[in-house]
Amino acid sequence: MSQPDKPATTAPPRLRGLIAVIALLLISPDSGAERDAWTIWDSRCQQCHGSVSEFARERLWNIDGQLHGKRHAEELRQFLHRHYIPATAIQSMREMLLAHARSTERFDSECGSCHGTAAEFVENSLWVRRDSITSLATGKDIAEFLSTHRNLSPDDAEFFFDLLLHVGNAR
């Protein structure tokens, strides 16, 4: 003859609530990941690289959702793995930097009416090599051309050259 199952003991309501909160924190994806990324930046990166937003705006690019650096042409995920970031914080650090990085939005809004998206323009009109860009139509050096194009300031010409270079090298 089988014995009836013993009824499970129930925890007091306060303990059940605490257990529920702990369980939610443990199963929530990246529950503290964003906070961890900022903490890691403040404790490990800020001393050399300064503010995360200034660093990202000066040195990083968001090219089609991929994070690229001025010196690191590859997607920076591998670089972050090698740069003292714990594996559990890589994705949140990448997302934090990606949110502050320069993107193709400025090209699309200021140049898109004539040239389409930055990716389309690079694909259809430019020959991009590691550090230089040439017009497929005219053979002109784009760095020189931008200095005279549409009254761009030297800073704007540099911005658009860097952007096109990064878009081209990301392909």
Image (cartoon, helix red, strand yellow):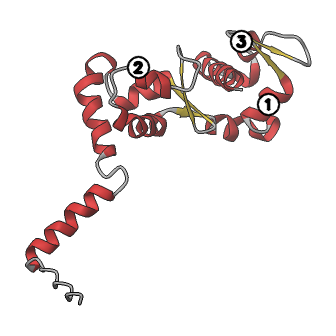
Residue linked to disc 2: 82
Q: Amino acid at mark 1?
A: Phe
Image point (69%, 39%), residue name: 108
| Contact? badges 2 and 3 (CB < 8 Å) | no
Earlier residue among tags 2 and 3: 2
Give whichever of discs 1 and 2 has the lower sequence position. Answer: 2
> For this view, does 169 lie left or right of residue 38?
right
Q: Which residue is labeled 3 in the image?
A: 143
Q: Marks 2 and 3: which is nearer the front?
A: 2
Residue in view at x 26 percent, y 23 percent = 44
Viewer-proximal residue, 61 or 141? 61
Q: Position of residue 95 (x, y in %)?
A: 45, 40
Query: Are the residues flagged by discs 1 and 2 in contact, CB closer than 8 Å?
Result: no
10 in relation to 167, above or below: below
- The residue that mark 1 highlights is 121
Q: Earlier in the sequence, mark 1 or mark 3?
A: 1
Q: Nearer the viewer, mark 1 or mark 3?
A: 1
Q: Amino acid at mark 2?
A: Arg
Residue 39, image quadrant: top left
Disc 1 crowd rating (10 Å Cα; few below 14, some 14-19, many 20+) is: some
In 3D space, how far apart are the residues under numbered discs 1 and 2 (Cα atoms)?
34 Å
Is 18 positioned to the left or the right of 46 in the image? left
Q: Which structural element holds mark 1?
A: helix
Q: Eyeballing the image, is 126 above or below 115?
A: above
Element under label 3? helix
Alpha carbon separation for disc pair 1 and 3 = 15 Å
Q: Quadrant of the N terminus?
A: bottom left
